[in-house]
Every structure is written in C-alpha cells, then in structure tokens.
Image: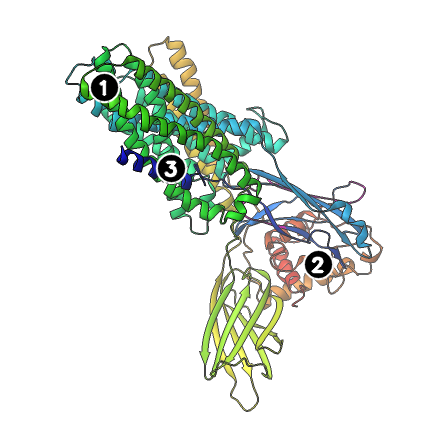
Amino acid sequence: MRFKRRILWLIVIVLLYSAWAVTPVLAHALLVRSNPAANAVLAQPPVQVELFFSESVAETLSDIKVYNTSGSEVDVRDVRVDPSDPTRMTVSLRSLTDGVYTVTWKAVSAIDGHQTQGTFPFAVGNINPASLPAGQQTTSSSLPISALIAKWLLLASLALLTGQFAFITFIWHPALKLSNGEVPSSLVLPKSWVKLYWIGLAGTVLAFILGVLAQAGQVNGNELALPWARETAKVLVETRLGVLWLDRLALALIGVWLIQSPFANWKRYAGFVVGLMLLFTVSLTSHAATEQYPLFPVLDDWIHLIGMTFWFGGLVYLFTGLRELKPLEDKLRTRLTSTVASRFSNMALVSVVLIGLTGLYSAVLRVGSISALLTSIYGHAMLLKQVFVAALLCIAGINLLFFTPHLKRARLSGAGNSTLVARFSKVVLVEVIVASLLLASVTLLTYLPPAKIAAPANTDFTGTKQVDDLTMEIRISPAHVGQNEFMLVLVSSDRQPVSTAKEVLLRFTPSQANIPPSEIQLIGDGTGMYMAKGTYLSLPGRWQVQAVVRRENKFDAFANFDFTINSPGSANESSAVPRMAGVVLIVIGLLIGLNLFPLSAKPALRFGVGGLLTVSIVGLGLFYLTRPVQASSGNVNPIPPNSESIAAGKAIYAVHCVPCHGETGKGDGPLGVVLNPRPADLSLHAIPGVHTDAQLYEWITNGFPGSRMPAWKTQLSDTDRWNLVNFIRTLAPKQ
C-alpha cells in the first residue's frame, strides 16, 4: 500500500506540471507596431501603411484598409506581405491631404489560421491631437464556435486513431495471452474497435471540412463559408495552412484504405504511422512552428500530442474493452479486468510523464511566469482547466487506492466479482467524460492569445573588429533593404570610450550591379557611440561596409564588415503554395478512386461516382500544378542601377515626368501644382524598402490608382521604364 501511495503522489506531481499545457498553445498574429504609429500626427503624408505582427501572416487572407473622415477608402488596395519578412504587411496610399485617417486591419496567422483584427487612427498636417483619442487603437480576436468544434473533433478523432494501437499492443494483447486461450478469438480485435477506428477517420474528415469552412467564414465575416465560395478555395490552395489540411485529408484516405478487409497485422502498424503523421500536421500548425528555431519545439509538441492521444484514446478503449468482456464467465472477466486495469495504469503513467515534461517545456516558452498565469486571459482559461485536471486526479486516486487492490485481490484468490467490475466500468466512463471536457477546455485555449508573445526574430547585423588600439563594434538595424539605423561604438585599448574622434564615416559598397560606393557621416553622442540613419542599403545581396575613424595625431583606422541582405522574394515563391496544393489534390483524387473502385457496389456507383470524383479532383490538381506563374510585385529589376541606366532614366524623367513631379520629385512641377489630387512625392515613394522595383514599374506602366498619373506602356519601352525606376530611386533622401 505504501508503494501505491508513492505512485499516486508521483502522478499528482506530474499532472500538476502538465496542468500548464495538456496540449500545445497555438499562435495568434498580434500587432506589434505600425508605421505610422497609432495616434501619430505627421507633418507630411505617408506613402504607405506598415504593420508588423508577432508571427507570419497569410497574404491572401489578410487585409488593410485606410479611410478618411468621410468614409472613403484612400489606399491603393495593393496589400502585400513581405516575402523576406512575412511578419510585415503593407498597403500603399494615394496622395493624402491634411486630416484624420483610420486604419483597419485583419491578420490571419499563416501558421494556424487564427484571425485578429483591429483599428487605429493617425493624422496628417496641422491637426489638433485632441481629435484623435476617440479612435484609440483596438485589437480583438474572435472565438468561432465552428472552428472550436472542428479542433476538438480533430484531437478527439486522432486520439481514437493512435490510442487504439497503443492499447492493443501494450495492454489488450498481453492481457489476453495470460488467459491461456480461454477467451474467444473475436476478442483479439473486437468489432466495436473497428467501428471506433472508422469513427476516428470520419471525424478527421469531418474536422477537415468544418475547419476549412470555418476558416473561410472568418475571412468573409460569417461563421461558415459555402464550400463553393471563393474564400474556401483561397484557404485550401493559396495558404500553407490549407495545404496541411489537404495533407490531413490524404492521410485519412490512406487510413480508410488500410482498414478495409482483410485487416492484416501490417496494416495495423501502417495505420499507427498514419496517425502519428496526422498528429505531426497538428504540430506544424502549432505555436511551436513559429519559433525562430522550431525543430525542438515542434518535436516537443509532437511528443506531447502522442502522450495525450495514448492517454485519452486509451481511456475510450479501456471502457469499450471492459464492455467486450461482459459476456465472459465471472472469474475470467474479473481476472482480465484486473490485468487490463493494472497494465493501463502503467501506460497512463508513462503518458502523463510525457505530457508533464513536454508541457512544462511548452509552458516556459508560452507562459513564462506565474504572474502571467494569474493575470492574463490565457492564464485564467488555463486555471479553469485545472478543475477538470483535479477531477481526473480524484478519479485516478479512487482507481489506484480502491479498485486496483480489490481487483488484484479477487484475481489472486480466483474469485469473481461482477459487481466490482461493473462499478469500475462506470468510473472509467466518468473518467472518459471528464477527459473529453478537459480536451474541450484545451481547445478553447488554442483560440486565446498566449500569455507570452515571442519576440520577432532579430535581423540586425552586428560585428566587431580590432584595429590598432581601437575596438570597433558596428550594428545595423534592421539590416533590410531601405531605411536603416547605423551605430558604431569605439572603445580604446584601455577599455575607455573614444568620444573625441574627428570624423567617423561608413562607406557602403555592393558586390553586384557595378554600383559606386556611397558614404555617410556618423554623429557622436559623447559616449563613444556614433549614429546615423539613411537608405544606403538599396539592393538585396552581398554588401561591404567600411568604417573609417579619423583622430587627431593618429593614423586613420579602417575596418571592413561583410554581410548579406535577403532578397525581397519573387513570383516563383508566391506560386509555391498553389503548386504544392495541386500535388496533394492529385494524390487525394487517386486515393478516392483506390477506395471506391474495389467496393462491392453497383458499377454505376463505383465507376460513375468514384470515377467522376477521381477525374474531377485530379484535374483540379493538375490545373493548380500547371497554372502559369502570375506576375507579382516581387519580380526583380533586370537592369542594374549603374551610371548608364541612371543617366538614361534621368533623360526620360526630364522629358515626361518633370512637368508634374518637378526636378526633385516633390510633386511641385509647373503642371503638378494645379492638379487635383496633387502628384505623388516621389522622394518618399523612391525610398528602398517602401516599394519594390516591380511595383514602381507597374505604376509607370499602368498608372497610379486614384491619381492623374497616366499609363506609359505604349510610349516607353520596357527598358526605358526600368531605367526610369533606377533614376527615381536616386530621388530618395539619404538621411
């Protein structure tokens, strides 16, 4: 009895640890910052709105709109997510006049599909800041009932699929072997368990359908979207999440084929592998996948799910297994019940340890502190979950301290006790119900923002060089194409800051395009730190930054720092998801045919319905697989911005653009001052990182929406337009 009590205390301790996270916490794309900032009053109008989120967002499902005080939309409707930084979403603006503007946004997580939305104001010109508080920044996320049901159904179905293999392998078959052939062969694999496996597969398919329609419904503002709605297709074939859902459907269809008779032993093992792969797709849509280094968090999440399905699924098969033993003779039934209960306790203990250890690691990443547990909404929901955990602990204590010893005593004495077995079955049923409620509370947690939001990946470049008696430490933030902050810290050999440098320069030299170097002078703050801002990194690729330090009575010190700026992406990247979806759709179509054609049904059903579905889905997959790549704003400028190209673009600009935009691009040309709306300030649009070269090329080609900007595609050649883009880039302010 003392040993049993020690086991009970071990279970209590591990479950308390696992109470932090019985299943993994899924992600939300929360707004981190914006440009313009909420409630900002700007001296000059911005050319775009930038939003930065806590994780990657899905471009096709997310949106930004900007309205003026009369309710008219003033954005260009070119919402895009930066391929090199998928947490950054932007939209271009028309020429804004003085006034107050409202930004509304909707962000759908590219990882798990959870949606957040919000609004904030900003002002342009001589506006009284007191007019802004009525439109303070707000952020909200919804709890769609259909999505919650789909997630609970998916987890419960996967528990049935993977829990069966574990229960049969580690509990049921070893217990039957101890009966010395006294049980009928029908109990080796009860028919009810085959039905439960079918229920698990059907539940997985139903969760797929409900989940996709719920996700598409969030996009169009409804609880559920229609299967043939445009948003449904966008979710399935244009998002990473949709491809993972299609993967789940394909795996479920493989499971359907495996369970068809004859149900050979190897098919049982293959079905277990299918279940594990289905669980892995869940981990790939968890918050663990958003980590900067996701390998170990995703593996931890996967192991966590395996432990959960072994435990919860095992409870279902324990209850139904006890019902299958009911027709047996009383002594044999009691003996088998005792053996099964004892072996299940061992498997449950291992599962709970896995859940506890992996859940603790997940809690450190997602919750972070006791105060966050007590003060956040997510923490409150987690504490509510402890009510169900406490109930399971009580049931586990009853089983361990009462039923297990009494069943063991009856087994050793060779006596039967049908009353005790019946009571034990009822307690197991209660445990199944409580576990289902616990699973429901965990599903709710997946749609609440986690208490601890992981900081976005740091892309800053840092480097340190020792030159003569100086230590130079450079930092470039965020080390992207466009506006950056440059900082150089100087420390002498005796570890004292060097604040008396005569001149501190940075020289920027790209390794491509034959572009001459540019230079910026840094300003010191008196503490050995020298800083400046500017748009000197104008191209993706390899760069060398040379730091030059000039001091009185010292030789000039030079240090070279090399680093790479990521490319902003290309059209090939944007087409990758639909192509992957096409491949999976082809596989799904073939699997449908594989499952329907062997059925002993009428040929019209097998070859008519089955053939039609197979051909239709395979054809749809081929369409997305072979669809031509669409042009996008990520296309790369084919002409390097060298001196020849810039000179050619300058000549074109002088003839066609100066009358409206003026010589410096400020929109103050002789015709521009009388136009309504005024021409755009090209010095702002030309800043690298604000718009891609391809976006500028598109506007030169087809005109700028909502403006008097004409289309030049019939008057300027492709080369002329690209040269014009390269010249316009030179109009951007350097500091």
The count of marks equals 3
**Relative to residue 77, is residue 131 drawn left or right?**
right
| 371 is higher (above) or lower (below) than 551 | above
Query: In x, y percent, where is residue 348?
Result: 32, 32
Please say if the residues under marks 3 and 1 sit with CB atoms less than 8 Å apart: no
Query: In x, y percent, where is residue 510?
Result: 51, 67
Determine crowd level at label 2: few under 14, some 14-19, many 20+ residues with C-alpha closer than 10 A.
many
At x 57%, y 43%, the residue is 376
Q: Kindly identify the amino acid type of the residue bearing the numbered disc 3.
A: Val
Q: Which residues are magenta?
A: 51-71
Q: Residue 407 or 352: which is nearer the viewer? A: 407
**Relative to residue 546, is residue 130 drawn left or right?**
right
For the residues labelled 2 and 3, the Cα–Cα distance comes to 66 Å
Query: In x, y percent, where is residue 270?
Result: 28, 29
Q: Kindly identify the amino acid type of the residue bearing the numbered disc 2.
A: Leu
Q: Determine the residue located farthest toward the bottom in the rendered image.
A: 553
Query: In x, y percent, where is residue 526?
Result: 62, 78
Q: Determine the residue located farthest toward the left in the rendered image.
A: 180
| 647 is higher (above) or lower (below) than 680 | below
Mark earlier in primary sequence (1, 2): 1
Which mark, residue 12? 3
Look at discs 2 and 3 and give the one toward the viewer: 3
Mark earlier in primary sequence (3, 1): 3
Dot 1 corresponds to which residue? 410
Q: Secondary structure at mark 2?
A: helix
Q: Is residue 65 visible?
A: yes
Q: Main secondary structure of the magenta part?
A: loop
Look at discs 3 and 1 and give the one toward the viewer: 1
Dot 2 corresponds to which residue? 682
